[in-house]
Image (cartoon, rainbow, N blue to C red):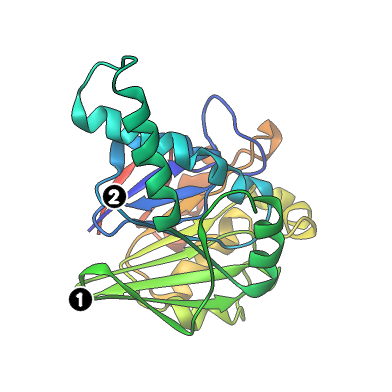
């Protein structure tokens, strides 16, 4: 199973990182729809798309407006035709036909808010079910976290993934039981340890807390995401000093492809 990191930054897109968006091309599942959605066209493989939102913040939802253009561009790349006055209407029609096949899933509070903003888009707006079936025999479950965000776990035979963003990692965090033993954990990390009080105040995790969460949940691999665009919150130079907490860790980046 392949995961593509389309947007690994938090809060504000930068030249280095767009905001939250993570895509599984083989099954057409996208976790959050931040500005990283603009990378989607070259990875689209299926005729349907399921978007699972963690919460309603703009850095996780703004990319919903890019999906028409994403479908249009993916179609253009796949067909290899030169656009002209004779075929442009066909490309537009196919992109418009793809919009109603887009399913946006979220908890009821998030769904109500986001749908009110993007009501003009003809997506299917679906409240999260206790258990969601995914293509290729997969199952998605969700769980609420401390900062009123939703975490996700996705399981297939031989493959498992968990997605944690915009929350504070603590030794007694309830979500740790939900992610236990996954092959791959995407976990937010918004700043270095010496600014832990700051990151917690704004509802985020710091470096050591994210690694401790991975260790306690006994996951196999950890990729840190949702890094802050604020230079003083960069933690990349500190990673080696805490790697002993959880050795199989790396910092995610836009365009990173992970097989798990």
Residue at the extreme front of the image, as rendered: 86
> In the image, what residue occupies the spot 47% across and 81% down?
178
Nearer to me, 218 or 81 = 81
Q: Residues within 10 Å of mark 2 (few under 14, many from 20)?
A: some
> In the image, what residue occupies the spot 35% across and 36% down?
41
What separation in Å lies between label 1 and label 2 (alpha carbons)? 17 Å
> In the image, what residue occupies the spot 25% across and 59% down?
260
Q: Which residue is mark 2?
A: 258
Q: Which residue is mark 1?
A: 157
Nearer to me, 51 or 208 = 51
Mark 1 or 2, nearer chain start: 1
Q: Is residue 107 visible?
A: yes
Nearer to me, 152 or 175 = 152
> In the image, what residue occupies the spot 50% across and 54% down?
242
Percent x, y of residue 74: 31, 35
Q: Is residue 38 above or below residue 200?
A: above
């Amino acid at each position: 199973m392949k995961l593509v990191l389309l947007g690994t930054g938090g809060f504000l897109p930068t030249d280095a990182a767009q905001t939250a968006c993570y895509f599984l091309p083989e099954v057409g599942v996208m976790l959050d729809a931040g500005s990283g959605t603009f990378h989607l066209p070259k990875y689209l493989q299926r005729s349907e798309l399921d978007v699972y939102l963690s919460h309603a913040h703009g850095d996780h939802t703004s990319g919903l407006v890019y999906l028409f253009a994403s479908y249009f561009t993916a179609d253009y790349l796949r067909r290899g035709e030169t656009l002209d006055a004779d075929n442009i209407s066909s490309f537009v029609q196919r992109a418009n036909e793809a919009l109603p096949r887009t399913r946006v899933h979220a908890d009821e509070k998030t769904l109500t808010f986001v749908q009110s903003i993007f009501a003009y888009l003809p997506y299917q707006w679906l409240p999260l079910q206790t258990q969601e079936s995914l293509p290729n025999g997969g199952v998605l479950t969700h769980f609420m976290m401390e900062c009123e965000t939703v975490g996700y776990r996705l399981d297939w035979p031989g493959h498992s993934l968990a997605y944690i963003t915009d929350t504070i990692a603590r030794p007694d965090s309830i979500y740790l039981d939900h992610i236990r033993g996954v092959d791959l954990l995407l976990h937010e990390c918004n700043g270095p340890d010496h600014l832990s009080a700051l990151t917690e105040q704004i509802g985020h995790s710091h470096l050591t807390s994210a690694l401790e969460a991975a260790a306690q949940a006994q996951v196999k691999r950890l990729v840190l995401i949702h890094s802050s665009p604020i230079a003083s919150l960069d933690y990349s130079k500190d990673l080696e000093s805490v790697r002993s907490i959880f050795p199989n860790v790396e910092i995610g980046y836009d365009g990173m492809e992970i097989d798990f």
